[in-house]
Amino acid sequence: MIPTLLVGDHILVNKFVYRFTAPKRGDVIVFKYPVDESRDFIKRIIAVGGEDLSIKDQKIYVNCKPAGADLPADRRSVGQVGGAASDQREHVR
């Protein structure tokens, strides 16, 4: 995965926009860490409701295509999964 944000980077977050529109694939979102709500998570959305998400040979696939394949080049930074090899499939709700 090519990092788009590095440790120490500063970002501005617009939480208001998602009251009017749903997040879409490729968006970077910020949310509270479920285990410790004093911390924030910053993540890129790789799948939205109704899409199939699978991991095979440490690569991420959305609807049987490599993740990010249909995103503009400046938003393509997904595709590799760290850790042990796994084969998983999940339907995103």
Image: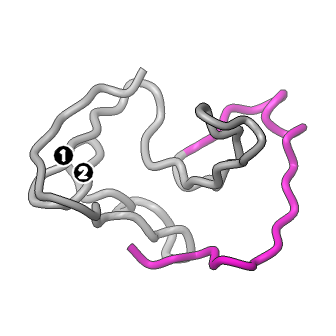
In the rendered image, which quarter is residue 33 located in? top right
Q: Tell me if residue 22 comes above or below residue 83 in the rendering.
A: above
Q: Is residue 89 magenta?
A: no
Give x and y (percent) for residue 76: 46, 69
Q: Nearer the viewer, residue 32 or 74?
A: 32
User: What residue is shown with label 1?
Assistant: 64
Q: Which of the two marks, 1 or 2, is nearer to us in this view?
A: 2
Disc 1 element? loop
Q: Residue at x 28, y 66 (%)?
A: 80
User: What residue is shown with label 2?
Assistant: 61
Q: Which residues are magenta?
A: 1-24
Q: Which residue type carries mark 1?
A: Cys
Give x and y (percent) for residue 83: 23, 61
Q: From the viewer's perspective, is 17 left or right of 3?
A: right
Q: Nearer the viewer, residue 8 or 71?
A: 8
Disc 2 element? strand
In what quadrant of the picture does the C terminus appear? Answer: top left
Are discs 1 and 2 less than 8 Å apart at CB?
yes
The alpha-carbon separation of the residues under discs 1 and 2 comes to 5 Å
Q: Residue at x 40, y 64 (%)?
A: 78
Give x and y (percent) for residue 85: 11, 57
Q: Residue at x 15, y 39 (%)?
A: 88
Q: Residue at x 9, y 59 (%)?
A: 57
Q: From the viewer's perspective, is 80 left or right of 68?
A: left
Q: Which residue type carries mark 2?
A: Tyr
Q: Residues within 10 Å of mark 2 (few under 14, many from 20)?
A: many
